[in-house]
Image (cartoon, helix red, strand yellow):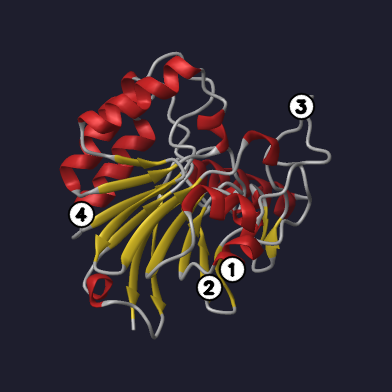
């Protein structure tokens, strides 16, 4: 009984630590066709910040980013929480990020749930500080090198009744209509990793995703337990996945309560 109590105390202490600490992960993705543009780039990969009013997580993120060389910052959606009343803290974070490195961001389901006035204010603030919000858009970084942001629509996350049954698919037709045919070497920012097969069909070289929060509760050394769609054992929850010529890296993100699914910033290198 004493051992069980001690174990429970240790577990509780770890969970508290895990939820108030951001870990750093270093990942190197290797592909034969990587252009020279990326070979020297240090990329900081963030996801699911879910910013509201508190700057607590933001300050920890900025500290990590400033602790090492960072050439590019990418954020794969849910930068803000759907529950924000204003963008004051988000705008402050955008200004801080842009002072560190060029910053690129895709749209997540929390941004999709914002009112029209709030999403417009967020995009206006991003424009003010030179942060690129890629809402079904792409930017040419160098000759035959592109960064894209794909936005899966609201129906892919919740149905018309706000539930999680019979969700819409995100198809090859959807991404092609949004971004055109894949061209050159493409780094795709796409919030939802559950559409990996679509990203593969489109032909992207590297896709970065978040959304799943590592499964919120992870079974150590095995898998994540639950997706935001209330589905058990999501197929893609954290780490590197490869199919055909496409590599997908899924972040556990930073916000939300989690157990054995540590918050992290990924410091990414893409090389030959």
Circles 1 and 2 in contact, beta carbons < 8 Å: yes
Residue 160 percent coordinates (x, y): 76, 27
Residue at the spot 38% in from the left edge and 24% down from the top edge: 54
The first of marks 1 and 2 along the sequence is 1
In the image, which is nearer the foreground, mark 4 or mark 2?
2
Q: Measure the C-alpha gap from mark 3 to mark 4.
A: 44 Å
The mark total stands at 4
| Mark 1 and mark 2: Cα distance apart in space | 6 Å
Viewer-side residue, 11 vs 244: 244
The Cα atoms of the two marked residues, 3 and 2, are separated by 32 Å
| Front residue (pair 169, 253) | 169
> Marks 4 and 1: CB-CB under 8 Å?
no
> Residue 90, percent across and down?
34, 27
Which residue is pictured at 40% across the width and 65% down the height?
A: 186
Q: Is residue 32 left or right of residue 198?
A: left
Q: Which residue is mark 1?
A: 200
Mark 1–mark 3 Cα distance, whole angstroms, equals 28 Å
User: Dot 4 lies on which element?
Assistant: loop
Q: Which residue is mark 4?
A: 67
Q: Which residue is mark 3?
A: 160
Image-based side of 118 in relation to 114, left or right = left
Q: Closer to the N terminus: mark 1 or mark 3?
A: 3
Instruction: State the CA–CA distance, disc 4 to disc 2.
Output: 31 Å
Rendered position, 162 above or below 223: above
Measured as percent of width and height from the top left, residue 58 is found at 33, 36
Question: Residue 40: x, y in percent?
Answer: 21, 73
Say what secondary structure mark 2 lies in.
strand
Question: Which residue lies under the disc numbered 2?
Answer: 246
């Amino acid at each position: 009984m004493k051992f069980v109590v001690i174990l429970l105390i240790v577990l509780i202490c770890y969970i508290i630590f895990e939820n108030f600490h951001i870990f750093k992960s270093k990942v190197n993705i290797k592909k034969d066709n990587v252009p020279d543009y990326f070979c020297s780039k240090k990329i900081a990969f963030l996801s699911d910040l879910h910013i509201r009013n508190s700057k607590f997580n933001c300050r920890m993120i900025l500290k990590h980013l400033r602790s090492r060389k960072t050439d590019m910052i990418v954020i794969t959606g849910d930068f803000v929480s759907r529950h924000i009343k204003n963008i004051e803290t988000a705008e402050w974070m955008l200004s801080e990020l842009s002072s560190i490195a060029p910053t690129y961001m895709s749209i997540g389901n929390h941004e999709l749930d914002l009112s029209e006035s709030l999403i417009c204010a967020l995009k206006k603030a991003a424009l003010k500080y030179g942060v690129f919000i890629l809402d079904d858009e792409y930017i040419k970084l160098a000759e035959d090198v592109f960064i894209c942001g794909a936005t899966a629509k609201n129906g892919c996350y919740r149905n018309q009744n706000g539930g999680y049954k019979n969700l819409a698919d995100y198809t090859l037709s959807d991404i092609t209509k949004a971004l055109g045919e894949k061209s050159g070497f493409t780094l795709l920012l796409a919030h939802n990793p559950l559409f990996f097969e679509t990203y593969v069909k489109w032909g992207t070289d590297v896709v970065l995703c978040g959304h799943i929060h590592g499964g919120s509760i992870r079974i150590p050394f095995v898998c994540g337990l639950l997706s935001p769609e209330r589905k058990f054992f999501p197929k893609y929850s954290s780490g590197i996945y490869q199919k055909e010529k496409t590599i997908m890296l899924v972040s556990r993100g930073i916000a939300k309560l989690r157990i054995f699914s540590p918050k992290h910033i990924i410091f990414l290198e893409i090389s030959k």
